[in-house]
């Protein structure tokens, strides 16, 4: 059964507080994805990104604010949960402690129409139990089972009525590390054996990468990337995806595009880019962004403010604060932070981070010289210099021996506040022992705008 979400949106209205009414929460924002028939799709992202809300809308437990949900050719957006043909496994399993395993698995079968006979329910329960390898535990109570066995009971219960779609809401989060590893392999086996279309919610990237046919990476209710797990890892769509996937995490370096070349710490790192000229904070494009989101003063008033004086300081001079009771004007300090404070006090309703991101995106669209971020995964380094560019001079802090690999922790030469992790094969151990500094060549790297968009 193919599952298709079209422009799915869920907005939770703001709540009343002592300070007033809080802003609406866009838990899911214009999501459009397709779960292929018989495949397992992983919804992946940090806590609060909207993945469980998406699952509950597919299940029918949350009503969408906008958009549609399709099961094959059937629009189920307004169909009650019990009529959707779904199996749902919650994070806490929700087993009935006073019922046996058999009775827990049979429980949803009592509501199946046309009504099933006792023999039919017994057969379906036994088949589901056998599928998850608990066929010999049907007479036990949940308290007599391990965590992994309880989880299998919950899956068997969801599969017993032969659902068109199986929905799993972080089903492994209550298990210990070893059992999680074993059980996620079982979930993949069960899904392949049953052939049921499955949506699996997790914040654990290893879980998503290991069992999903397709993963959807989400953040703040917005889909960041959809693809096969390895493709998402190898070709992250933006800085968020690059940082979220990977253990150990990707190394991020501050860089600069200048005259078509990429620099790290003022040293040439890579060539072949397009950039020229400087970007001015007096650019009219920043005003246009503010005006689009509610800024009220005219362009002339805006420019007068930025070029003139402010009645109160937005960022008082360090060590020389201006007393709040002194009304005299002071020079306006031209920074992006101060511009935001000015426009936000005059009608612009963008959040500070969103305002910055839009300015960064606008600056990038002009192709000017600008700061960027360079991402290099720990395993993408080499000790061999094959080119004069792409070199990171590394001061070694310490070395971790982790079996077949060696993990070097250090910092960019003469930058003690930076932290870099490099993973190399253990056979290269002799080439680094006794050294305080080495040059690492980046075999593969990514370049991102400050807004997070990927350049290379």
Image (cartoon, grey):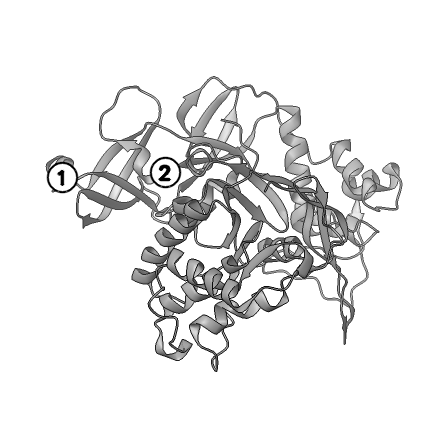
Measured as percent of width and height from the top left, residue 134 is found at 36, 64
* Residue visible at 47% across and 80% down in the picture: 97
Measured as percent of width and height from the top left, residue 70 is found at 69, 44
Q: CA distance from mark 1 to mark 2?
A: 19 Å
The secondary element bearing badge 2 is classed as loop
Measured as percent of width and height from the top left, residue 356 is found at 66, 43
* Residue visible at 32% across and 42% down in the picture: 414
Q: Which mark is residue 219?
A: none
Identify residue for label 2: 377
**Crowdedness of circle 2 by 10 Å Cα count: few (<14), some, many (20+)?**
many
- Of residue 319 and residue 84, the one placed in the foreground of this image is 84
Residue 289 in which image quadrant: top right
Is any atom of residue 185 visible in this view?
A: yes
Give above or below for 51 relative to 378: below
Identify residue for label 1: 429
Q: Earlier in the sequence, mark 1 or mark 2?
A: 2
- Of residue 91 and residue 87, the one placed in the foreground of this image is 87
Is any atom of residue 169 visible in this view?
A: no
* Residue visible at 48% across and 31% down in the picture: 447
Q: Is residue 58 left or right of residue 371?
A: right
Measured as percent of width and height from the top left, residue 276 is found at 59, 20
């Amino acid at each position: 059964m193919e599952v298709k979400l079209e422009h799915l949106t869920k907005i939770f209205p703001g709540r009343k507080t002592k300070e007033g009414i809080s802003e609406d929460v866009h838990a899911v924002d214009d999501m459009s994805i397709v779960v292929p028939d018989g495949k397992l799709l992983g919804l992946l992202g940090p806590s609060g990104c909207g993945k469980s809300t998406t699952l509950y809308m597919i299940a029918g437990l949350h009503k969408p604010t906008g958009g549609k949900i399709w099961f094959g050719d059937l629009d189920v957006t307004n169909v009650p949960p019990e009529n959707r043909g779904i199996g749902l496994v919650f994070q806490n399993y929700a087993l009935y402690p006073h019922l046996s395993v058999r009775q827990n698995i049979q429980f949803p079968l009592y509501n199946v129409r046309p009504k099933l006979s006792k023999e039919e329910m017994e057969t379906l329960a036994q088949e589901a139990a056998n599928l998850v390898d608990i066929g010999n535990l049907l007479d036990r109570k949940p308290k007599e089972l391990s965590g992994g066995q309880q989880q299998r009971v919950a899956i068997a219960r969801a599969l017993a009525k032969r659902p068109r779609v199986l929905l799993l809401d972080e089903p492994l989060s209550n298990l210990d590390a070893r059992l999680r590893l074993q059980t996620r392999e079982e979930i993949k086996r069960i899904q392949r054996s049953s052939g049921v279309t499955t949506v699996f919610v997790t914040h654990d990237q290893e879980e998503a990468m290991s069992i999903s046919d397709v993963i959807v990476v989400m953040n703040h209710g917005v889909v960041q990337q959809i693809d096969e797990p390895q493709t998402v890892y190898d070709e992250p769509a933006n800085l968020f995806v690059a940082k979220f996937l990977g253990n150990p995490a990707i190394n991020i370096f501050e860089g600069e595009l200048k005259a078509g070349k990429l620099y790290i710490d003022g040293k040439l790192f890579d060539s072949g880019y397009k950039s020229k000229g400087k970007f001015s904070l007096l650019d009219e494009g920043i005003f246009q962004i503010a005006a689009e989101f509610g800024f009220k003063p005219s362009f002339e008033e805006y420019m007068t403010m930025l070029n003139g004086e402010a009645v109160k300081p937005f960022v008082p001079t360090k060590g020389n604060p201006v007393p709040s009771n002194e009304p005299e004007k002071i020079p306006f300090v031209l920074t992006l932070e101060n511009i935001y404070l000015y426009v936000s006090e005059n009608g612009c309703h963008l959040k500070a981070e969103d305002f910055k991101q839009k300015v960064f995106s606008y600056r990038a669209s002009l192709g000017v010289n600008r700061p960027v971020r360079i991402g290099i995964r720990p395993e993408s380094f080499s000790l061999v210099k094959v080119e004069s560019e792409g070199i990171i001079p590394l001061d070694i802090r310490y070395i971790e021996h982790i079996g077949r690999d060696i993990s070097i922790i250090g910092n960019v030469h003469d930058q003690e506040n930076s932290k870099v992790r490099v993973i190399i094969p253990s056979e290269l151990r002799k080439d680094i022992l006794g050294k305080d500094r080495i040059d690492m060549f980046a075999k593969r790297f990514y370049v991102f705008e400050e807004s997070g968009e990927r350049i290379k």
